[in-house]
Structures are given as C-alpha cells and as structure tokens.
Image (cartoon, grey):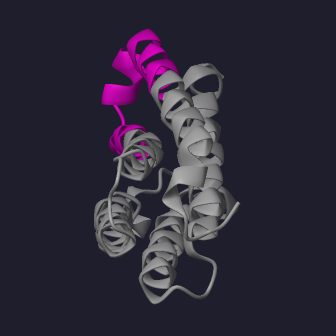
Amino acid sequence: MSGYLTASWSDFSVSMVGASAALTGLLFVALSINIERILTSDALTARSLSTMILFVVPLVIGTLLLIPGQPRTALGVELVAAGIAAGACLLPVNRPASRGSLEPRYSWWLFRLLPSVTIALFLVLAGSSLIAGVGGGLYWVAPAAIEAFLAGLATVWVLLVEIRR
C-alpha cells in the first residue's frame, strides 16, 4: 500500500468512518444520560463539544478519502484545509480557561491540548506531503485518526463514568 495512492486506502477509510459514527453515537448516549450535570458545568460542556469535533474529524477525513477519482493534489488541499479547520475548532474550545477545577492539568494537556495541536499538524503534514509526493502522504492520516479516537474516548469515559463519582 502506498501513502500516495488513494484507492488503496478505501478499506481504512470505510473503517474510520464507521468507527467515527459509532463513537459519535456513544457520545450522544453519554450526553443524554448525564445532560443535567454536563449543562451545569462550562468545562464539561466544552469537553463535550471538543469530543464531538474529535469524532467528526475522522468522519470528514474518511469521507474525503472515499471520493472516487479525486486527484491527489485536490485531496492534499482538502486535508490541509481539514487540518487547519480542526485546529481552528479544537484550540479555542480547549483553551486553558476551559479546564475545569476538577480536571487535572496533566489530563488537560494529554487529552485536550495535545490532540488539538497534533491532529491539526498530522493532517497538514498528510496533505502537504501528498501534494509534494514525498514525506509519507496518507500515512499521516492514521495517527491523526487514532489520536482523535483515543482522546475522544477518554472524554466519553469522563462523561459516562467519572461525572457520577
């Protein structure tokens, strides 16, 4: 499989879109179960929005990769734009002021700030290297998706379980 041939990434894209849809459903379950507690805290509301964005990013990326016959340069530009958009959405939501008093600083760094920066960076690298034809291409999409899923799952755990402690 090549990082520059989009057709060979279709199975990965389909699985990424399916996982994103399933995890978004899990987020809505968590939100609906604990909506009253979440709405009383600006920090939890921000975490919920951040998680929604984290799960939408792989959905968008997977969908872009599944567009048939799309030129490599066009996909590269779309991935760069998706990276910039992801960072522009995630960074304001995960700013230091949105950290709740009960959220440890290391948790905020690891599960909110770090993914906000690196997911955007991975997608910009994927798009840029796809356009250039060197540097890894679509292989940069995998860590972006994995990080989005893991960071989102950590917050879903908080919204489902930790919020009740």
Work out whether residue 137 or residue 34 is closer to the camera in this orientation and state it. Answer: 137
Report the residue at 47% width, 50% height from top: 100
Say whether residue 123 is left or right of residue 162. left
Q: How many marks on residues?
A: 0
Residue 36's place in the image compared with 95, above or below, is: above
Give the image quarter of residue 59: top left
Give the image quarter of residue 35: top left
Percent x, y of residue 101: 52, 51
Percent x, y of residue 13: 53, 43
- Residue 148 seen from this side: no
Q: Quadrant of the C terminus?
A: top right
Q: For residue 105: magenta?
A: no
Percent x, y of residue 75: 35, 66
Work out whether residue 121 or residue 91 is closer to the camera in this orientation and state it. Answer: 121
Report the residue at 56% width, 74% height from top: 137
Say whether residue 153 is left or right of residue 124. right
Report the residue at 33% width, 63% height from top: 82
- Residue 89 seen from this side: yes
The residue stretch that appears in magenta: 24-50
Residue 3's place in the image compared with 8, above or below, is: below
